[in-house]
Amino acid sequence: MKKIHFIMCTLFSVLLLFSCKEKPLKTGELQIDFLHLVDNKEIVYDSMMYTNAAGNPYSITEVKWFVSRVTLFKDGEKIEIEENDGIHYIDTKVESTLTWKIDQLFEEGQYDSIQFTFGFNEKDNISNRFVNMPETSMAWPRFMGGGFHYMMINGKYKREDETVAAMNVHMGIGQIYEGSTYDMDSITDFVHNHFVATLSIPFLIENNKSTLISIVMNIENWFQNPHIYDHNHWGGQIMQNQDAMYMLKENGWNVFSMKY
């Protein structure tokens, strides 16, 4: 009788062990494509075919920018991208950067939204963080705050007198200057112009499958709503003009969208 009792207890323990063993998580992969549109159409580069809300004709040569701290949300849970602190560099002239196949597995299920920082927060924006091209081309001068550009939109615009000028819409750390000069010795403070974008479009990650989503930069929205951005007023170079960068930051709320 004792032997039978022992055998039954042993079997019960084995069954209990197997029943308590966690089932493996069902996971899938995620790929993000980055698209750049003007008026809902793919950019035609180096063509003076666009007009912003201020009436400035302009062309685009290239768009270069960073996302960081990319985060997914699922049922109230926050899932951070672990690869390189969720940082990815995008460059319309480097095709490989327009696709980010994330080296991480995600639990299957319905996700509510994706969130990212445009550019870098204060902690992440470190000089010499990148030591190779093409990222090093985005370095921001140390005397102007250091770190890296958040974004470059390079192209040209047509002035009121019909002459053509450089359009270098560059965003990064802004500076506050004492007086009316842009001398490095007159800098009294720095301003961080990054912001967080949240794209609340549900998407599904399935077991053993790769999900594709697209983050879209709608270029025209940098120049409108709530502020009409006039190239004739701000000029072609704004790296030392915090007022211009702040206006772009304010307009950034409506720049990004998502496709799934």
Image: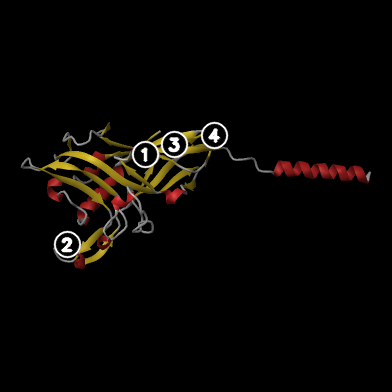
Instruction: Indicate the position of residue 133 as horizontal and vertical percent values.
Output: 33, 49
**Contact check, label 4 and label 3, Cβ < 8 Å:** no
At mark 4, the secondary structure is loop
| Gap between marks 4 and 2 measured at Cα | 55 Å
Q: Please tell me whether mark 1 or mark 2 is closer to you in this view.
A: 1
Residue 68 shown left or right of residue 78 in the figure? left
In this rendering, the answer to whether 147 lies above or below 97 is below
Q: Which residue corresponds to mark 2? A: 182
Graded by Cα atoms within 10 Å as few (under 14), some (14 to 19) or many (20 or more), the crowding at tag 2 reads some
**Distance (Cα) linking label 4 and label 1:** 24 Å
Q: Residues within 10 Å of mark 3 (few under 14, many from 20)?
A: some
- Relative to 187, say whether 229 is above or below: above
Q: Which residue type carries mark 1?
A: Ser
Q: What is the distance, in whole Å, between disc 4 and disc 3 at their CAs? A: 19 Å
Q: Is residue 248 visible?
A: yes
Residue type for callout 3: Pro
Residue located beneath label 1 in the image:
96
For the residue pair 93 and 38, the one nearer the viewer reads as 93
Q: Which mark is on residue 208?
A: 4
Residue at 28 percent of width and 46 percent of height: 252
> Which is more N-terminal, label 3 or label 4?
3
Instruction: Name the secondary structure under disc 3.
Output: loop
Write down the quadrant of residue 19 in the picture: top right
**Sequence-first tag of 1 and 2:** 1
The answer to whether residue 186 is left or right of residue 3 is: left
Disc 3 target residue? 202
